[in-house]
Amino acid sequence: MGFFNWAAPLIRRFGDRFTADDADAIGRWIRPAVEPGGHVLDVGGGAGQLASLLAAALHARVTVLDPTPEMLAHVQASEHVVAVGGVAEDMPFDDDAFDAIVVSDAFHHFRDQKTAVAEFRRVVRPGGLVLVLELDPRPFVMRLIVIGEKLLGEPGAFMTPQQMCAFMAEHGIAGECEPLAKADYRFLGRVEKDRPAA
Ligand SMILES: C[S@@+](CC[C@H](N)C(=O)[O-])C[C@H]1O[C@@H](n2cnc3c(N)ncnc32)[C@H](O)[C@@H]1O
């Protein structure tokens, strides 16, 4: 996690990437599973900017899970936003604890993506939603970012939208991938626990 330790101030400085409109859109995507007062988990939620906006947009509680103390230190904790240290692959939460999970620009950093998805299935209640916001590694500018992250010691395991959908379905979360602006795309899937995971 060394990269995020030293990069945290930079990410925090330049990382206010979400507007209230972004959070409204993200909130609409997961709203079918999140009633007011519901509980959302932001995995790899970093400094918690999205968590704060989402908590306001959804009138829900949002827990930020992140292994980097330097990122978590910036979370504006409140009655509705809680910061918890930990990794996606081994979450310190009960089964079925959340109505939805959001993962923004973090999935490619998970060292064991298969175990992380198994944890998503475990901590999200049946019928809950998993939203992953990722970057498609194919456009030229993204290839430069992939190389840059490798050089900085944080090689990401990026997936194309097609690979993401196939990977999630294979590990028990069926859903759909849709392109967003620039190289961003979203995966949105529902957790059905009566179907066996791979
Ligand atoms: C580029 S930042 C994204 C932060 C925030 N989600 C956003 O969209 O601004 C990636 C985050 O993933 C976190 N991360 C890295 N490995 C992780 C893991 N195994 N489990 C959970 N989070 C992880 C890092 O600490 C970092 O805060």
Image (cartoon, grey):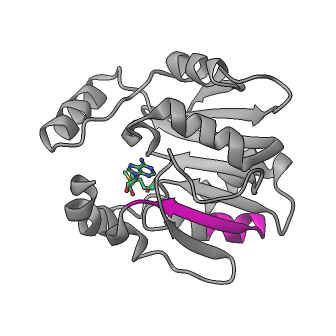
Position of the C terminus, as image quadrant, is top right
As rendered, which of 99 and 185 lies closer to the eye?
A: 99
* Image side of residue 110 versus residue 70, left or right: right
Q: Is residue 182 above or below residue 176?
A: below
* Image side of residue 149 versus residue 29, left or right: left
Q: Is residue 132 above or below residue 142?
A: below
- Identify the residue at image location x=59%, y=74%: 82
- Identify the residue at image location x=54%, y=23%: 164
State the image coordinates of residue 121 (x, y, percent, origin top left): 69, 39
Q: Residue placed farthest to the bottom in the image? A: 78
Q: Is residue 7 above or below residue 118?
A: below
- Asked whether the viewer can see residue 198, the reply is yes
Q: Is 66 contained in the magenta span?
A: yes
State the image coordinates of residue 61 (x, y, percent, origin top left): 72, 69
As rendered, which of 69 and 187 lies closer to the eye?
A: 69
Q: Is 52 contained in the magenta span?
A: no
State the image coordinates of residue 197 (x, y, percent, origin top left): 70, 24
State the image coordinates of residue 105 (x, y, percent, origin top left): 44, 45
Specify the quadrant of the image occupied by residue 187.
Answer: top right
* Image side of residue 54 versus residue 196, left or right: left
Specify the quadrant of the image occupied by residue 155.
Answer: top left
- Identify the residue at image location x=51%, y=17%: 163
Position of the N terminus, as image quadrant, is bottom left
Q: Which residues are magenta?
A: 53-67
